[in-house]
């Protein structure tokens, strides 16, 4: 009989990967590190919060396995489970920086953000991505996607950033689950009852054909372990989020007049030649662009009227030594799923391209240019062709680019006059080390629309709204977001649309203060260190970090 | 979700803590911790209204194995058979460690 890896639970996954008798669990079920946010919503918690951390050896090499339990709440990442992963990756980083080689392996069986702890999930996932980027300078960060859940949502973005991805054919990888796409874009966009379509599009066999997975093995414990050992020996890196020219060239060649089928996409994928893409700074145009809060502030701050660019939804420009980047709606965009300002394929790859160029230009400078993100992103794009091509890689590319720029010494500052939602926010916003937001009721800051979140968590919208009263991380407004402690400043008295000269001056001075406050900080730790974070917002996070540190 | 609490008079003290199971659909996790007091069981269950069923399952278990421990259970809709299986599995795990 075959010894299935997929059928095992998270703890067994970790034990199966590590050498016999070498494993030691960190912050395990006996440490009482339970999510404080589930019981108030009448949800049964788990003593390890669905993440198993196991130190040990793999083929004699020091290693850590971080294993996500797909059977507990769909493997969703909340505050405690997220903090366990982040704290562990940061300890692995510390060890490697001190000359002690430790190999991290992440078993991804996860739906992404745990919707019942929405904004904590987003914060944690961005922190995981940041740690992965930092670690890749020292060791490969190896991902295993065994299935049944697969790797979805924000954790598919994380998967795209990992050095090397091993999967079985029982797994799927995608940003948006089919049900969410159907909910947001209609059954014609993606029929979530069509299992063949889903597996042919998101299944790992198709992912392997287009380099979104590095290796698909038959489901046995030995196969998985051997692939990991082989990767530790060969240290291959897929550089999956560093192909912006290739993907922007591919998108140039896409025929958007007809529905993309898998066969013709694979054909296109094989035949694309990458050409150099440079996305020039925005210039003044004749025609007014589609109105949005993000555009209004971008134009007011940079002084560029009717700003336009070669990628109509991505604007960037330098002003007073700072680089401003905004993602904006374009009602006439040829990609229908981004017309309201969502972050889609082109947006992710274009932003990555711009940020990578900035980093390259400033490579030898002592003082790196600050990058200011103007955040008004209602979500990621929900679409069939987006998933087929791999929107998670597009979003991973920009998230990775921002993280790298910050780690290279660029101050990365968010100015949030509009929405900051889900994958859009992960791609454009959550890698910043200071967040400035306007205190305006119109701002939505969340992981998923109410309709979709209700559908996925099998609750009514009324029940969902009731839950938001007890758990600030579930709420959709900026005032509740402030309670998590992640904001540098919540600016009162300026409305989302009030991009006047006077207000621009005020915001500029706050941005300058934020940059000064960095004092060499290249991390995301500020989020845990604010008074609000320490007192309540990230209490559980800080407790997890302390425990991981003690037990390391 | 419902929280349940039970006490039992038992005799066989355990020396080490043990954890088994997963809070998966139709499954539960069980933690036994050593105690010098009475056996105390705290349950968080996703299925409301099964107090008496739990009491029966637990009474039967402790009649057979009078183990003395502080017990925590997180349950996501498991049947009495599965509950009994996990409790017995926890005892097995305690034996293995000795």
Image: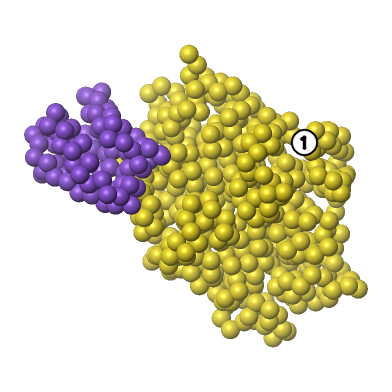
Q: Which subunit holds the residue at mark 1?
A: A
Residue A414 image position (x, y, % from top left)? 63, 66
Task: Identify the residue position indicated by label 1 in the image.
Answer: A262
- Tell me how the rendering is colored: by chain
Residue B92 image position (x, y, % from top left)? 25, 25
Residue A195 image position (x, y, % from top left)? 63, 36
State which chain is coloured purple. Answer: B
Q: Nearer the viewer, residue B63 or A243?
A: B63
State which chain is coloured yellow. Answer: A
Residue A170 image position (x, y, % from top left)? 58, 30
Question: How crowded is the residue under tag 1: few (<14 C-alpha within 10 Å), some, or many (20+)?
Answer: some
Task: Say whether residue A259 is left or right of residue A443.
Answer: right
Tell me which residue sits at (55%, 47%) in the image: A112
Please state, as top left, top right, bottom left or bottom right, where the C terminus of chain A lies in the image. Answer: top left
Q: Is residue A158 visible?
A: no
Q: Nearer the viewer, residue A396 or A405?
A: A396
Q: Is residue A187 visible?
A: yes
Q: Is residue A271 above or below residue A305?
A: above
């Amino acid at each position: 009989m075959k010894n299935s890896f997929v059928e095992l639970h998270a703890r067994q996954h970790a034990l199966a990967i590590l050498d016999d008798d070498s494993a030691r669990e960190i912050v395990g079920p006996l440490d009482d590190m339970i999510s404080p946010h589930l019981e108030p919503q009448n949800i049964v918690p788990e003593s390890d919060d669905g993440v198993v951390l196991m130190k040990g050896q793999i083929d004699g090499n020091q290693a850590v396995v971080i294993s996500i339990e797909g059977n507990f709440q769909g493997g969703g990442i909340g505050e405690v489970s997220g903090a366990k992963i982040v704290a562990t990756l940061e300890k692995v980083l510390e060890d490697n920086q001190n000359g002690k080689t430790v190999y991290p392996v992440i078993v991804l069986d996860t739906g992404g953000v745990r919707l019942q702890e929405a904004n904590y999930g987003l914060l944690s996932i961005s922190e995981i991505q940041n740690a992965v980027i930092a670690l890749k300078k020292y060791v490969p960060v190896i991902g295993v996607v065994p299935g049944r859940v697969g790797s979805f949502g924000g954790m598919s973005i994380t998967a795209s950033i990992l050095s090397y991805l091993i999967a079985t054919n029982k797994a799927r990888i995608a940003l948006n689950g089919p049900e969410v796409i159907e909910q947001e874009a209609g059954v014609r966009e993606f029929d979530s009852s069509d299992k063949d379509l889903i597996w042919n599009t998101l299944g790992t066999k198709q992912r392997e054909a287009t380099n979104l997975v590095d290796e698909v093995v038959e489901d046995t414990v030995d196969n998985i372990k051997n692939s990991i050992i082989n990767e530790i020996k060969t240290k291959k890196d897929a550089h999956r989020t560093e192909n912006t020219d290739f993907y922007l060239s591919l998108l140039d060649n896409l025929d958007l007049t007809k529905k993309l089928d898998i066969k013709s996409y694979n054909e296109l994928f094989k035949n694309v030649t990458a050409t150099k893409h440079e996305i020039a700074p925005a210039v003044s145009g004749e025609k007014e662009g589609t109105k949005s809060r993000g555009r209004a502030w971008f134009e007011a701050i940079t002084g560029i009227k009717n700003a336009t660019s070669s990628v109509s939804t991505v604007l960037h420009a330098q002003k007073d030594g700072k680089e401003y980047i905004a993602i904006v709606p374009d009602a006439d965009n040829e990609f229908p799923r981004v017309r309201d300002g969502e972050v889609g394929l082109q947006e992710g790859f274009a932003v990555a391209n711009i940020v990578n160029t900035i980093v390259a230009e400033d490579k030898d400078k002592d003082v790196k240019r600050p990058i200011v993100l103007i955040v008004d992103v209602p979500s990621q794009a929900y679409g069939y062709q987006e998933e087929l091509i791999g929107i998670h890689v597009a979003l991973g590319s920009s998230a990775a680019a921002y993280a790298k720029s910050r780690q290279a010494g660029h101050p990365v500052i968010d100015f949030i006059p509009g929405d900051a939602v889900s994958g859009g926010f992960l791609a454009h916003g959550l890698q910043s080390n200071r967040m400035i937001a306007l205190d305006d009721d119109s701002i939505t800051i969340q992981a998923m629309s109410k309709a979709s979140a209700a559908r996925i968590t099998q609750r009514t919208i009324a029940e969902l709204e009731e839950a938001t009263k007890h758990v600030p991380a579930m709420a959709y407004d900026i005032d509740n977001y402030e309670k998590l402690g992640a904001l540098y400043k919540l600016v009162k008295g300026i409305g989302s649309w009030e991009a006047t000269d006077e207000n621009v001056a005020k915001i500029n001075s706050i941005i300058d203060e934020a940059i000064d406050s960095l004092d060499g900080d290249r991390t995301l730790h500020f989020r845990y260190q604010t008074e609000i974070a320490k007192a309540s917002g990230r209490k559980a996070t800080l407790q997890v970090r302390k425990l991981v540190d003690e037990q390391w | 979700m419902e929280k349940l609490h039970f006490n039992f008079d038992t005799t066989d003290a355990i020396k080490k803590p043990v954890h088994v199971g997963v809070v998966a659909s139709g499954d539960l996790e069980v933690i036994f911790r050593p105690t010098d007091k009475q056996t105390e069981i705290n349950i968080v269950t996703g299925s409301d209204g099964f107090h008496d069923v739990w009491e029966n399952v637990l009474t039967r278990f402790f009649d057979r194995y009078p183990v003395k421990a502080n017990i925590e259970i997180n349950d996501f809709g498991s049947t009495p058979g599965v509950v009994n299986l996990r409790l017995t599995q926890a005892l097995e795990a305690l034996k293995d460690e000795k």
